[in-house]
């Protein structure tokens, strides 16, 4: 910053002729400016340019900055003064708006939010790799880890990022940052059944389902699975459904381009689970999306933007991304129609889905939140 060495009287003398010029401009339109000086004789310089006390909107304390109402002429004159560091228009500012991932309005999630349905009070368990509970865009209420070596300070630590991404699609907060989830006021529970490499076992999934039953979850999302069936895993999936939980599961990523194989994985293939296939923005089945008679609903699963650990965001592909759209829609609809049983809610989602094509590829079609609410 330049050193101010010229005395006030000299400055006033040098700029006295300008005083009358600017006095004649008082009727000109004035605008907001921020002006920063490099010395103590600020008020004298301002008076020399015809800036009255009423034009001083604020004097800052920590830096020699004034918030001023100035004509264009006054602003230009100050800009050229050797003892003025900066003259800037007082630019407008607003809160950064959050991004709405394409999948949320695609399943009518934003329409239902506008109608007041945000999944408020509905408990959604995310059986996955954990959730980054410190993420600014997520509100993790509680949870469980099946691993003995979980960090006591962060028991649901998500070293993979998969579970955090799934959680954001369900319930990323409506907070003017990041992204928006389908049901932003749903209660998220992190049930860590997969390790930080994204691997786990059927026993871990069964334990996660048992915890969900014992802790009165409303919806369970399982964006996971395997190719081998298990009687015990099926028993636990059935038990959760019989207990009143809506069980949502990713159909799997073993589809082919023709979409003519029976490749739905487990637990999605069990009758007690909703097997969710993936579509793109044009409602075309993603070529990776598993197909077969167990497919029940479709949802966005291509280029889905959501939360990842470290207050970050990224786009993923997979039926893992499709399933949480259905879980979020279910939370919205259940808030709107709390009298429904899980069986009735499931039937309603089927009835109001948008038909997209062959049932072995799309099931009943694209899940639609507001249509189910207004049905």
Image (spheres, rainbow, N blue to C red):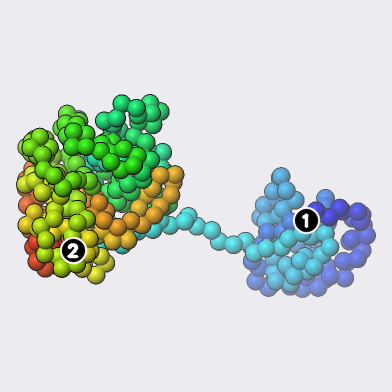
Q: Which mark is residue 256?
A: 2
In the rendered image, residue 71, in percent from the top left (x then y), is placed at: 70, 69
Q: Residue at x 73, y 67 (%)?
A: 75
The residue closer to the viewer here, 152 or 365, is 152
Q: Where's residue 231, x and y in %?
A: 7, 37
Dot 2: element: loop
Viewer-closest of 254 and 301: 254
| Residue 258 found in image quarter | bottom left
Please determine whether, in this image, residue 169 is positioned above or below residue 280. above
Residue 47 percent coordinates (x, y): 80, 60
Is residue 365 toward the left or the right of residue 25 in the image?
Answer: left
Q: Residue at x 73, y 60 (%)?
A: 86
Q: Residue at x 22, y 64 (%)?
A: 287
Q: Which residue is mark 1?
A: 37
Front label number (2 vs 1): 2
Seen at 10% across and 49% down, the residue is 269
The residues bearing labels 2 and 1 have C-alpha atoms spaced at a distance of 68 Å
Which tag, 2 or 1, sits closer to the chain's start?
1
Is residue 206 in view? yes
Mark 1: secondary structure: strand
**How would you rate the neighbour count of disc 2 (Cα within 10 Å): few for under 14, some for 14-19, many for 20 or more?**
some
């Amino acid at each position: 910053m330049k050193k101010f060495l010229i005395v006030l009287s000299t400055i006033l003398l040098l700029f006295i002729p300008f005083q009358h010029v600017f006095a004649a401009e008082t009727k000109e339109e004035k605008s907001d400016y921020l002006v920063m000086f490099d010395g103590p004789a600020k008020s004298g310089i301002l008076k020399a340019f015809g800036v009255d006390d009423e034009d001083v909107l604020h004097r800052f304390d920590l830096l020699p900055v004034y918030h001023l109402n100035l004509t264009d002429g006054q602003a230009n004159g100050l800009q050229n003064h050797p003892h003025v560091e900066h003259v800037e228009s007082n630019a407008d500012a607003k809160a950064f708006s959050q991004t709405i991932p394409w999948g949320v309005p695609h399943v009518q999630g934003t329409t239902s939010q506008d109608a007041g349905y945000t999944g408020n009070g509905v408990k959604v368990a995310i059986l996955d790799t954990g959730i980054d509970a410190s993420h600014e865009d997520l509100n993790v209420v509680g949870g469980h880890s099946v691993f003995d070596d979980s960090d006591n300070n962060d028991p649901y630590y998500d070293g993979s990022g998969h579970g955090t991404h799934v959680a954001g699609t369900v319930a990323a907060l409506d907070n003017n940052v990041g992204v928006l989830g389908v049901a932003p006021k749903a209660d998220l529970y992190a049930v860590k059944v997969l390790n930080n490499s994204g691997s786990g076992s059927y026993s871990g999934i069964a334990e996660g389902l048992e915890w969900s039953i014992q802790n009165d979850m409303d919806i369970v999302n399982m964006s996971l699975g395997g190719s081998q069936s298990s009687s015990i895993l099926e028993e636990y999936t059935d038990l959760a459904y019989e207990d009143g939980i809506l069980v949502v599961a990713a159909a799997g990523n073993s589809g082919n381009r023709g979409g003519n194989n029976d490749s739905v994985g487990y637990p999605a293939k069990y009758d007690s689970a909703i097997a969710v296939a993936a579509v793109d923005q044009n409602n075309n089945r993603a070529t990776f999306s598993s197909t077969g008679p167990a497919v029940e609903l479709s949802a966005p699963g291509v280029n889905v933007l959501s939360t990842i650990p470290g207050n970050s965001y990224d786009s993923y592909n997979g039926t893992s991304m499709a399933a949480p759209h259905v879980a979020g829609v279910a939370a919205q609809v259940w808030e709107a129609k709390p009298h429904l049983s899980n069986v009735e809610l499931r039937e309603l989602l089927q009835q109001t889905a948008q038909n997209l094509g062959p049932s072995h590829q799309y099931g009943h079609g694209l899940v639609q939140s507001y249509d189910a609410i207004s049905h």
